[in-house]
Image (spheres, helix red, strand yellow):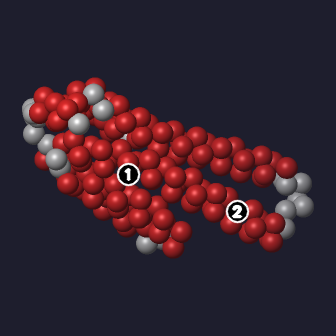
């Protein structure tokens, strides 16, 4: 993920489209912050109930609640990642970035029924292929001139 952030930062600087980097940075920040918060909340929950008062229904309800909040945060994070990849596809002309963003978003929505993990994996493969199919040097001046003229 760090390498993708570095690549998107350099791409955003070259194309003067900061939204490409900013949206993916927001997606990453949401995902990492929420995962850290869930971890701390779980530790707090287990510490409070370590005296033996922990019962089955409490754990099940708490787990479902955390799972639902994680799903919501993942969906929001994936929507920002999709926006970033769609902007990248628009600037680079590589349609695989757009497909990867759509697969991330759809995968995050369907993750609740476990089908989404397959779609997210396919989206990762698409993004890898898209990065490798980019030329070493792009005609950045043309795309920058078109966006400035609009």
Residue 117 appears anywhere in the view: no
Quadrant including the C terminus: top left
For disc 1, the neighbor class at 10 Å (few under 14, some 14 to 19, many from 20) is many
**Which residue in the protein does label 1 denote?**
82
Q: Position of residue 33 (x, y in %)?
A: 58, 40
Q: Nearer the viewer, residue 41 or 72?
A: 72
**Residue 70: percent from the left, percent from the top?**
60, 56
Disc 2 is placed on an element classified as helix
Q: Is residue 112 above or below residue 75?
A: below
Is residue 60 visible to the viewer in this orientation of the structure? yes
Could you tell me which residue is drawn at 75 percent across and 62 percent down? 62
Q: Position of residue 59 (x, y in %)?
A: 77, 65
Question: What's the mark number on residue 2?
Answer: none
Instruction: Kindly identify the residue that appears in the image at 70 percent across and 62 percent down.
Output: 65
Residues at marks 2 and 1, CA–CA distance in whole angstroms = 26 Å
- Mark 2 or mark 1: which comes first in sequence? 2
Quadrant where the image shows the N terminus = top left
Name the residue rendered at 67%, 58% in the picture: 66
Q: Nearer the viewer, mark 2 or mark 1?
A: 1
Circle 2 is placed at which residue position? 65
Whole-percent x and y of residue 97?
A: 25, 51
């Amino acid at each position: 993920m760090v390498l993708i952030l570095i690549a998107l930062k350099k791409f955003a600087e070259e194309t003067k489209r900061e939204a490409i980097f900013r949206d993916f940075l927001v997606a990453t920040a949401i995902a990492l912050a929420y995962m850290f918060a869930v971890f701390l909340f779980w530790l707090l929950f287990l510490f409070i109930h370590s005296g033996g008062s922990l019962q089955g229904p409490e754990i099940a309800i708490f787990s479902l609640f955390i799972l639902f909040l994680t799903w919501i945060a993942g969906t929001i994070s994936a929507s920002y990642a999709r926006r970033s990849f769609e902007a990248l596809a628009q600037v680079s002309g590589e349609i695989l970035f757009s497909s990867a963003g759509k697969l991330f978003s759809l995968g995050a929505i369907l993750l609740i029924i476990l089908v989404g993990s397959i779609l997210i994996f396919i989206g990762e493969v698409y993004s890898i292929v898209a990065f490798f199919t980019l030329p070493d040097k792009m005609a950045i001046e043309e795309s920058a001139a078109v966006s400035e003229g609009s």
